[in-house]
Image (cartoon, rainbow, N blue to C red):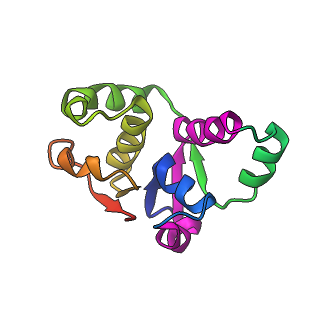
Amino acid sequence: MSEVVLDASALLALLNDEPGAAKVAEVLAEARMSSVNLAEVVSHFIHAGMPAADVDAMLRPLPVEIVAADEGLAHIAGRLRAVTASAGLSLGDRFCLALAKRDGLPAMTADKQWRTIAEAADAKLVLIR
């Protein structure tokens, strides 16, 4: 059962061995992630020049539950724009928060800016650094 929702920044920290990677590694087996955030991770590595097959091979064995971006999540994410725009959160960020909010789980991120909107978004956060 998932206990945390990963933002793309958290998974990227783990995969790139950045500060905070150990915190992500500790919860990886109990984590879930929106398919929108997975797309952000894939996009990051493709943009950096990694071949698609290598990206797939790197991500496939991860024990993260990927949750489809359905209509319900889309509505929650869309409504979050009003309280997250001032912090510059992206659509992907809002999908992470929407999934966390819907499922009553904390969102794990490397983005410290999220602290400024956590209360207004009614979100529990875990900052990795």
Magenta region: which residues? 20-48
Q: Residue at x 34, y 58 (%)?
A: 106
Q: Residue at x 75, y 45 (%)?
A: 55
> How many numbered discs, if any?
0
Between 102 and 54, the residue placed more toward the observer is 54
Q: Residue at x 60, y 36 (%)?
A: 39
Q: Is residue 26 above or below residue 83?
A: below
Overall secondary structure of the magenta stretch?
Answer: helix
Q: Is residue 103 above or below residue 61?
A: above
Is residue 38 part of the magenta span, yes or no?
yes
State the residue lying farthest toward the front.
48
Using the rendered view, name the quadrant where residue 4 is placed.
Answer: bottom left
Q: Is residue 40 above or below residue 19?
A: above
Is residue 41 part of the magenta span, yes or no?
yes
Percent from the top left, x then y, of residue 8?
51, 47
Percent from the top left, x then y, of residue 49?
74, 37
Direction from residue 47 to residue 12 in the image, left or right = left
Q: Residue at x 59, y 53 (%)?
A: 65
Between 31 and 17, the residue placed more toward the observer is 17
Percent from the top left, x then y, of residue 24?
50, 66
Location of the C terminus (image quadrant): bottom left
Percent from the top left, x then y, of residue 68?
56, 36
State the residue lying farthest toward the right.
53
Between 50 and 81, the residue placed more toward the observer is 50
